Image (spheres, rainbow, N blue to C red):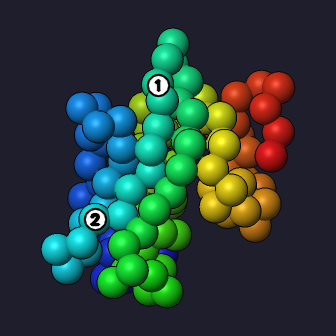
Amino acid sequence: MKAEYLELPLVKNDETHRFELTVSGHTAFIDFKERHGKIWLIHTESPEQLQGKGVATALIEKTLDYLEANRFEMIPLCPLVVAYLQKHPEWNRIVAAGHSN
């Protein structure tokens, strides 16, 4: 993750079911569904103004950190999250049993 994103807070917005990261007034997000200690990561979206700047990667990394720290199991449905996990297989430790990417 780029150093400029390290201190930015990840917001778990339970009202909209999104993990959010706001950079320069623009918000990237991951849609999620939560149930019984599991979180399904459904879709990642980054506004055009943030694309190509590493914001989506920072959002994914911060979300995975949050999930691990809060002992959630993850079910990755979003292709971008799946691609990230393929490059960083160490995160498979929080993927729910029976859900490979």
Q: Residue furthest left?
A: 25
Element assignment for label 1: strand
Amino acid under disc 2? Thr
Amino acid under disc 1? Glu
Image mark for residue 61 = none
- How far from the left and from the top, in percent, is residue 7? 26, 69
Report the residue marked by disc 2: 27
The residue positioned 49% from the left and 17% from the top of the image is: 35
Element assignment for label 2: strand
- How far from the left and from the top, in percent, is residue 80? 64, 61
In this view, the residue in front, 65 or 17, is 17
Residue 2 visible in this rendered orientation of the protein: no
Which quadrant holds residue 69? top left
Asked whether the residues under the numbered discs 2 and 1 touch, taking CB atoms below 8 Å apart as contact, a structural biologist would say no
Report the residue marked by disc 1: 34
The residue positioned 42% from the left and 69% from the top of the image is: 46
Picture layout, residue 23 above or below residue 70: below
The residue positioned 52% from the left and 69% from the top of the image is: 57
Crowding near pointer 2: few (<14 within 10 Å), some, many (20+)?
Answer: some
Residue 29 visible in this rendered orientation of the protein: yes
Picture layout, residue 24 above or below residue 34: below
The residue positioned 50% from the left and 57% from the top of the image is: 44
- How far from the left and from the top, in percent, is residue 52? 49, 86
Tell me: 90 left or right of 38: right
Separation of residues labelled 2 and 1 (CA atoms): 21 Å
Crowding near pointer 1: few (<14 within 10 Å), some, many (20+)?
Answer: some
Picture layout, residue 15 above or below residue 21: above
- How far from the left and from the top, in percent, is residue 27? 28, 65
Tell me: 8 left or right of 100: left
Q: Residue furthest top?
A: 36
Looking at the image, tell me whether mark 2 or mark 1 is earlier in sequence order: 2
